[in-house]
Image (cartoon, helix red, strand yellow):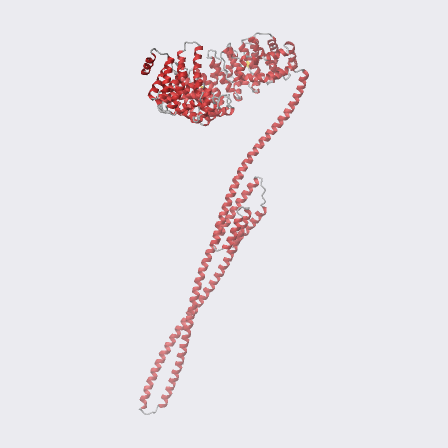
Amino acid sequence: MSFIFSKIRQGAGTQPSGAETIQKLCDRVASSTLLEDRRDAVRALKSLSKKYRFEVGTQAMDHLINILHTDRSDSEILGYALDTLYNIICNDEEEEQDESEDETAQKQADDLGIQFTDRLIQDPENVTLLLTLLEEFDFHVRWPGVKLLTALLKNQGAQLQGIILVSPMGVSRLMDLLADSREVIRNDGLLLLQQLTKSNAAIQKIVAFENAFERLLDIITEEGSSDGGIVVEDCLLLLLNLLKNNSSNQNFFKEGSYIQRMKPWFEVGDDNSGWSAQKVTNLHLMLQLVRVMVSPVNSPGATASCQKSMYQCGLLQQLCTILMATGVPADILTETINTVSEVIRGSQVNQDYFASVNAPSNPPRPAIVVLLMSMVNERQPFVLRCAVLYCFQCFLYKNQKGQGEIVATLLPSTIDANSISAGQLLCGGLFSADSLSNWCAAVALAHALQDNLTQKEQLLRVQLATSLGKPPVSLLQQCTNILSQGSKVQTRVGLLMLLCTWINNCPIAVTHFLHNQENVPFLTAQISENLGEDERLVQGLCALLLGICIYYNDNSLENYTKDKLKQLIEKRIGKENFVEKLGFITKHELYSRAAQKPQPVFPSPEQMLFDHEFTKLVKELEGVITKAVHKSSEEEKKEEEVKKTLEQHDNIVTQYKELIREQDSQIQELKEQVSSMSSQNEQLQTTVTQQLSQIQQHKDQYNILKLKLGKDNQSQSNGQADGGQVNGLQTEEITMLREELEELRKQHTLLQTELSDKDTLISSLRSESLQTAEVSSAAESDHTELLKELEALRSQVQAQSIEINQMKTDAMSSDAAPSGDGSSDSAKMAELESRLAAQTAETERLKAEVKSSSESRAELEQQLASATSTVAILQTEKEKLQTEVQESKKEQDDLLMLLADQDQKIHTLKQKLKDLGETVDDEDDLDTRDQTDDDYEEDEDED
């Protein structure tokens, strides 16, 4: 760079001016072909950009932008160009230099940065180019690019937001900065996103859905939560930008369970002294973040959902711990009270929990009592007292239970002399010498009566002891006494707001107020006088109070009926003057400020005059009171008649409403019953379907069994019939089952008959076999005797043959001797031959008998063998038949059990259908079924 300056001085001969030097550097940037020369020239421009901001901006901006386009490959020259652009656009350096200068010079410096910003973003491609350069990981490119975009957003945020929004992946590239491991880039990326997300809901949504909540909460945890440094503060500021007035992001934050991750932020120890300023700032922002989620300006549903989540995750309990802790800085305590206020506002569960919180004192006191002690203590800071009042208002908001508890502490029957109650503190503040305490106590007590007629009537019973020896006076009378004493404006305004809230829409309270003869003259005197500016608000409130006495007057007091009060106004004040004084309330400068939001925020105690809920009451009553005052007596009578008629109609309508409400409740109950019965019906239908499926399974099993028994045709016909009736009525299916059972019974009877016939045949065959065996045995014995006789005959024949042969021998020997005995021998021979012939014939006969006996024996043996085989065959058939009979009996028993189960289930289902109102004609079926069951039982007994 020194070489460049030396060349410039040599060429000029004299010391060049800043503008000339910058011009020559710009020429070198534009004309040099060497990258090193261009880099040196841009470096020189960077060094001159702070001192000669205007000259560099006007002459070099186009060349620098061109460098960004052409020299993308060299990170060093890109870094110099981005730094130079940042120096001419950013106003920070100018602010440091011009701290002692006047506002005009500072405004000129700001305008210069805006002019250069407009020139740069005139071409949207330049912004797209910068977004593209952020993808470079090089530190010398990415960091200057982040700082330059941040400066551009500070100067022309809305225009740059529009360009980035339409740039492809523009927001995603910026979100990647949070993941950079270099803390400098990540921290400056947080500042860039803060500027980017300001007042642009579309970009806020994109950033949120780019997982910003997760990344930011992780960074907060890594940096030490509330004990962290400025990085935690930047993260919290970015979270506030994303969530504030953005219902979509709030819902996304709640649905993502990020509320639960806020609880550890508020964990404080016992020793809370010596908090650093950064920790106070961080906790303050964390509390604001909680308030953003439950702000009264959010939709009621979203607020209630967040309040529920905060209670369930323990965040409310943690905040109450801080509330009751010691040593907490005053501003953190104040913001914590405001945060707790909005977390419990309108949430009955949270309000009940807050009512149960006790301060760590001895004896323990309710947190509400401790807070009210601070509110009525004039030594406490003003903002803290305002925060306590807001907390008390939020505790009573839409909380009739809490209102009743507060009013009960004022009633004679519940006062405890040994302890301090909320009612005692409110009465003490109401009548103290401090006007701010008077106003706060009056407004707090008014919130205990807001929209609660019962408590307004109960508060009329409160009696106050003013001094010894004097009778007690009512709280209502004491309030009017203080009004008449002419106290400070703030005190009178507070008491008048309390009285207006008290007697509004409460005719009994109006009667009590008018019963004091001094009240009406005091109000008319206050309204009719011409007082200064400070008293105009009091006059307007007195007019409002008197107007309420007219509008809600039940004419129970003769001296102060509606007509007489209007006549009194017309004579002493004038109707127009009365309406004009009534209008002083809404025309007051502090009225509109109080009407904007529920939280009481005032610059100073003197300006603390209006309550937010009271402004709603004024807006509601101003018109009706004006009409009521202008009406004549005739119009009043007509209106009374119309009112009575309307009341009658209202009574009728109320009765009808009650009737409709009862009918609605009955309808609701009936709907619940119908819903219950429908569910039962669905269950029953499911059960029926299951039973049908089971029946079908049993039928299939039964068909398979029948097929196994050989009854194919019948099983197929039954199977088709059953298949056709799967989706039919159960009564038809039962009938078919009964028919099949009857067929089985017939088959069983037939088998029993066949079995008995077989038994008879077997018995006869057995007897025949026994007879045959006996005959065979007798024949065998006869055959044996015949054989014995035959052997005996044979032995006799042999003996006779021997004898004959002997005789023949003797005869031959006798032939040689003299033949004197020849005749006797011949006779013997003849006798022997005849005997032999007889024995031979007998032998032949016996042989024939033996042969016949053998044949008969063989035949009998053959018959015996045949009978034995027949008996064996019949015995096998008998065993087979007995097996079939047992299987048939078993199948019959199974079917009978199935039929009984189905009868019981069908009876139960039909009974349930009858209970549901369905018409079921089952008497004939039941009779038929009972008769069939009886017949079957008789058959079984016979079997």
- The answer to whether 241 is drawn above or below residue 581 in the figure is below
Q: Is residue 575 left or right of residue 379?
A: right
Q: Which of 780 and 203 is in front in this view?
A: 203
Q: Give residue 76's quadrant in the image.
A: top left
- The answer to whether 576 is drawn above or below residue 767 in the figure is above
The mark tally for this picture is 0
**Residue beneath the point at 54% across and 44% down:** 907
Residue 692 rendering spot, x and y as whole percentages: 51, 45
**Residue beneath the point at 43% across and 13% down:** 109
Q: In which quarter of the image is the N terminus?
A: top left
Say if residue 186 shows up in the picture: no
Residue 158 rendering spot, x and y as whole percentages: 47, 20
Q: Which of 766 and 494 is in front in this view?
A: 494
Q: Nearer the viewer, residue 697 or 199?
A: 199
Q: Give residue 500's quadrant in the image.
A: top right
**Looking at the image, which residue sits at the far right?**
634
Q: In this view, does 187 lie to the left or right of 410?
A: left
Say if residue 106 shows up in the picture: yes
Residue 415 rendering spot, x and y as whole percentages: 52, 17
**Residue beneath the point at 57% across and 20% down:** 453
Residue 512 rendering spot, x and y as whole percentages: 60, 15
- The answer to whether 925 is drawn above or below residue 748 in the figure is above
- The answer to whether 740 is drawn above or below residue 324 in the figure is below
Q: Is residue 457 left or right of residue 819?
A: right
Q: Is residue 634 left or right of residue 813?
A: right
